[in-house]
């Protein structure tokens, strides 16, 4: 995973020990770099003690950050002593980066309360945060009001902030692809491109006929041969599957990937059920699964908001996301349910064995010879985060719900790609979804990243986010 690049501001105040600012700056740079960040900060001799105190310091730091605005994904503010709140907020306001900001303050120790060692960062942090609030600059707080940079709490804060920065930088400027029109029966996947554009997210479209034509007329034999080998290596194909069916899927994958690459698409949604099967002769599941495994998530039934949800989860965790239906109750266990899709799950999302065969339900109605490409399996047990982002066109807002749960491995005897999901107070979540008009589709990821997603989507993207905690 690519390292997150952050700008660093170390605060100081004239009548507090400058030695604490000097050592604090050096120590936190080392900590951040060891935690996987690229750190950008002006040279130590650019300001007194390498810290920010005056308006002149703020202007210098702001110019430096502006010069690196295409690199910086977040800002860390650290207070080794009380700090100067005006210098810090002027730096942030003048730089105009509009990236996530983490505010950290150092602990005092009762055995070092003499004037050479007393920090007063406990108090200074309140002043910094008050000024950020006054200027409507959103920021992320640490778990503890003050803490050692070597504490487990601060290390957890850095991990979470890293996730927040990846989510925000990845969504702002994201490019989504809508391949084909919304299936007529799926009013649930309606959405507003204009609301997405207002958040910096662009949607590009292509008619399904163009993709089908590209696949049918594919002439690059080497690319086709390489794709067939990639499919063979990806997972076991049901015995007896005609080679022509696999070749058809390979050509579809090549056509979709070509358009995705040309349009620089970050996540896509494809019209599937049942146009592509009737008009081309295979399912899209395998093509979507392989793209998802390669870091380009793809959602079913032209569910663009589902694709965005998959992308957000992937940005948070660095792992591929699955796309599922909230589908069935699990007998009388009201905190568990069965989620299903045909499926297009990336193989690392599945986490175990699977086979590639025909769509079961659609194959029974239009013929299995038109329906090759579904990944059949039960998702392996483990922790998961679920997310659904939706445009609320009536209210003119973007909304989401997010939470954590787990996949369980109790067997479920049914067709398709199955996931047995456990969520504390699942009935409360389902009630919230019904009352607030959320869709039956959901994105899931084998990670625990709900806190970071809530902060990133709510505080920094400005969306209405409900975090379900059971």
Image: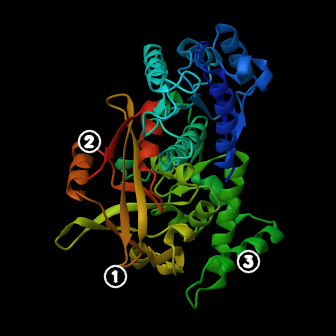
Q: Estimate how packed mark 3 is, as few (under 14), some (14 to 19) or many (20 or more) residues with alpha carbons within 10 Å.
A: few
Number of disc labels: 3
In terms of depth relative to the viewer, which is nearer, 293 or 256? 293
Q: Position of residue 52 (x, y in %)?
A: 65, 18
Q: Estimate how packed mark 1 is, as few (under 14), some (14 to 19) or many (20 or more) residues with alpha carbons within 10 Å.
A: few
Q: Identify the colour scheme used.
A: rainbow
Inspect this view and state whether residue 461 appears: no
Circle on res. 436 = 2
Q: At numbered mark 2, what does the secondary structure look like: helix, strand or loop?
A: loop
Q: Position of residue 277 (x, y in %)?
A: 52, 68
Circle on res. 411 = 1
Q: Position of residue 341 (x, y in %)?
A: 41, 67
State the separation of the CA atoms marked 3 and 1.
32 Å
202 relative position to 183: left or right:
right
Q: Mark 2 or mark 3, which is nearer the start of the sequence?
A: 3
Circle on res. 224 = none
Identity of the residue drawn at 41% across and 73% down: 381
Identity of the residue drawn at 66% across and 80% down: 244
Q: Quadrant of the N terminus?
A: bottom right
Quadrant in the picture for residue 115 = top right
Which dot, 3 or 2, sits closer to the camera?
2
Q: At numbered mark 1, what does the secondary structure look like: helix, strand or loop?
A: loop
State the separation of the CA atoms marked 3 and 2.
46 Å
Q: Mark 1 or mark 2, which is nearer the start of the sequence?
A: 1
Identity of the residue drawn at 56% across and 35% down: 201
In terms of depth relative to the viewer, which is nearer, 302 or 450? 450
Circle on res. 229 = 3
């Amino acid at each position: 995973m690519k390292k997150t690049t952050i700008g660093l501001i170390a605060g100081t105040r004239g009548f507090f020990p400058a030695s604490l600012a000097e050592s604090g700056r050096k120590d936190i740079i080392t900590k951040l770099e060891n935690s996987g960040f690229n750190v950008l900060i002006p040279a130590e001799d650019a300001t007194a003690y390498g810290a920010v105190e005056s308006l002149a310091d703020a202007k210098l730091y702001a110019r430096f950050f502006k010069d690196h605005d295409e690199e910086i994904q977040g800002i860390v503010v650290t207070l080794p002593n009380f700090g100067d709140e005006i210098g810090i907020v002027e730096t942030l306001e003048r730089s105009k980066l509009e990236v996530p900001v983490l505010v950290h303050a150092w602990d005092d120790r009762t055995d070092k309360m003499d004037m050479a060692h007393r920090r007063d960062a406990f108090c200074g942090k309140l002043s910094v945060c008050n000024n950020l609030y006054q200027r409507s600059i959103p920021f992320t707080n640490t778990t503890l009001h003050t803490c050692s940079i070597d504490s487990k709490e601060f290390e957890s804060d850095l991990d979470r902030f890293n996730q927040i920065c990846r989510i925000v930088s990845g969504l702002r400027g994201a490019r989504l692809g809508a391949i084909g029109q919304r299936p007529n029966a799926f009013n649930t996947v309606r959405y507003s491109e204009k609301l997405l554009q207002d958040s910096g997210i662009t949607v590009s479209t292509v008619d399904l006929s163009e993709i089908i034509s590209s696949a049918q007329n594919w002439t690059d034999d080497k690319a086709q041969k390489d794709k067939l080998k990639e499919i063979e290596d990806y997972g076991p194909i049901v015995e007896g599957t005609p080679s022509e069916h696999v070749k058809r899927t390979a050509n579809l994958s090549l056509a979709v990937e070509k358009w995705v690459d040309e349009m620089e698409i970050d996540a896509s949604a494809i019209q599937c059920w049942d146009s592509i099967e009737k008009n081309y002769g295979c399912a899209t599941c395998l093509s979507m699964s392989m793209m998802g495994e390669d870091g380009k998530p793809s959602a079913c039934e032209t569910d663009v908001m589902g694709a965005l949800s998959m992308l957000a989860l992937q940005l948070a965790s660095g792992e591929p996301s699955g796309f599922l239906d909230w589908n069935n109750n699990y007998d009388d266990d009201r905190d568990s349910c069965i989620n299903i899709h045909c499926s297009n799950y990336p193989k690392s999302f599945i986490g175990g064995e699977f086979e590639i065969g025909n769509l079961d339900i659609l194959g029974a109605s239009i013929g299995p010879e038109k329906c090759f490409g579904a990944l059949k399996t039960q998702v392996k047990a483990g922790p998961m985060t679920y997310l659904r982002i939706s445009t609320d066109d009536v209210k003119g807002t973007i909304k989401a719900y997010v939470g954590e749960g787990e996949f369980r491995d109790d067997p479920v005897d049914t067709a398709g790609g199955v996931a047995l999901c456990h969520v504390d107070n699942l009935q409360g979540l389902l009630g919230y979804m019904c009352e607030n008009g959320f869709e039956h589709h959901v994105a899931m990821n084998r990670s625990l990243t709900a806190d970071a997603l809530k902060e990133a989507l709510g505080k920094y993207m400005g969306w209405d986010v409900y975090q379900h905690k059971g």
